[in-house]
Image: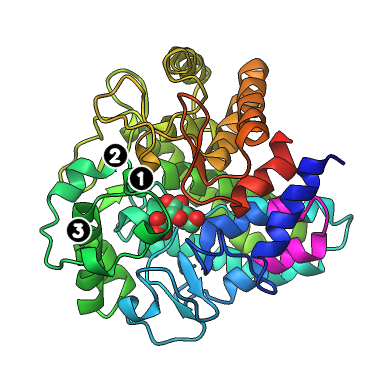
Amino acid sequence: MTDRDDAARAVLRRNDRGGFTVPNGRVYPFQWNWDSAFVALGFATFDLDRAWRELETLFEGQWQDGMVPHIVFRAPAEGYYPGPEAWGIQRQPLTSGISQPPVAATAARVLHDLSAGDAARIRGLFPKLFASHRWWHEIRDPDGTGLVTMVHPWESGRDNSPDWDEPLSHVVPSVDVAHLRKDLGHVDATQRPTHDFYNRVMTLVEEAKALAWDGVSVARTLSFRVCDLGIQSILLRADRDLLKLAEELGFSTEATALRDWIARSETAMQRLRGADGLYRSLDLRSGRLSEAVTCAAFLPLYARTASPEDALALKEYLAATRAVAGFSVASTDPRDRRFDATRYWRGPVWLMMNRMIADGLSGYGLTEEANTLRQDSGELVRRNGFWEYFDPRNGAGCGGPDFSWTAAMWLSWSG
Ligand code: 9WN
């Protein structure tokens, strides 16, 4: 074990609030959905019980209809907007009203594989995981198209990606929340989304509040309705992992439903393929594919739904962008006019994204490319520490320091 491994464990321990982990104590002082799934992989390298606990506490925030909220406000904390009052949801524990990419089943499968035949924890979690997948496939795909709807850029976890520029331009801001923001007290404004972005996304929160957060009404009527290539791919991969668990544990009814969802998604995802062969997100209101090519373009590999030809095209695409960007994978194509090297999801490299992309590349036999991503990711941490995200041009750390998922990725993958 190296000093850096020790430091990574120390980050997780410091951000541990007793059964759940905050992404960063100052910038994000609550429990986040997909952060917890990645963090569980980090804990699993030295404390498997604590890793399970991370997923279990996340699911304590699950709604009756199956949704796993993107934030669980488990304990009061200052320093973040929008906090619980802005969502107006009366339930305990307090939560936000939207979700995030469903990485949890994939993480649970990893934990189960490490649990040496002890199935007690996965048996407890399985019905909750299944309910959350059903929520995506039924409530967020009310017409059974095979493409799930996200209703808010924060659901993608790639908040201000250029993928959302066009669909968000049709949301007419009805609020001005610039003065309520707290993120700019922690992080340089050039590394965060704009005020205009915040006004539009908080308008969406107001729209959903007016519908009393009713799941199907929200999915059918919010003024931002997009099939995110990221969520769609991550869900398909997680469906496959959950199916493996269902088969092993003997949940046969659930296994049948999962097989149907998988088949439906595989067919529907072909609608996300652009004229150049690369996959994109789809604006479900306008029927238009996103113009931008972002890091999500690689995730059909992670979903194991890309063809071998797609994989070769992505291999070339990776080499071309890497030659321009320096460190991979830039969250937006560095040759695109919308690329911004330090602004959040418009350019920076994120380690958990690299991990999923590398998993995808390995799955298609592109071992050398997968290793390159792993080395790049390790190098970013070795040079600069456990930052939230990194400038692809020079590797400089951006956003919050001592970040949980970056430490977790170091421990479980790139270190
Ligand atoms: C909104 C916690 C989260 C991540 C997201 C990342 C960022 C929040 C914000 O931080 O989003 O959910 O306020 O900027 O974009 O992926 O889960 O780390």
Q: Which residue is mark 2?
A: 163
Q: Earlier in the sequence, mark 3 or mark 1?
A: 3
Which quadrant does the N terminus fall into? top right
Label 2 SS: helix
Which amino acid type corresponds to the residue marked 2 in the rendered image?
Asp
Q: Nearer the viewer, mark 3 or mark 2?
A: 3
Q: Residues within 10 Å of mark 1 (few under 14, many from 20)?
A: many
Q: Which residue is mark 3?
A: 200
Label pair 3/2, CB-CB below 8 angstroms: no
Q: Which residue is mark 1?
A: 228
- Residue 80: x and y in percent read 41, 68
Whether 28 is among the magenta residues is: no
| Separation (CA) of disc 2 from disc 1 | 8 Å
- Looking at the image, residue 48 lies above or below residue 61: above
Label pair 2/1, CB-CB below 8 angstroms: yes
Residue for point 25% across, 50% down: 194
Instruction: Identify the magenta region.
Output: 41-54
Residue for point 56% across, 64% down: 25
Residue for point 61% across, 26% down: 376
Quarter of the figure with residue 5: top right
| Separation (CA) of disc 3 from disc 2 | 15 Å
- Residue 314: x and y in percent read 47, 19
- Looking at the image, residue 386 lies above or below residue 383: below
Count of labels in the image:
3
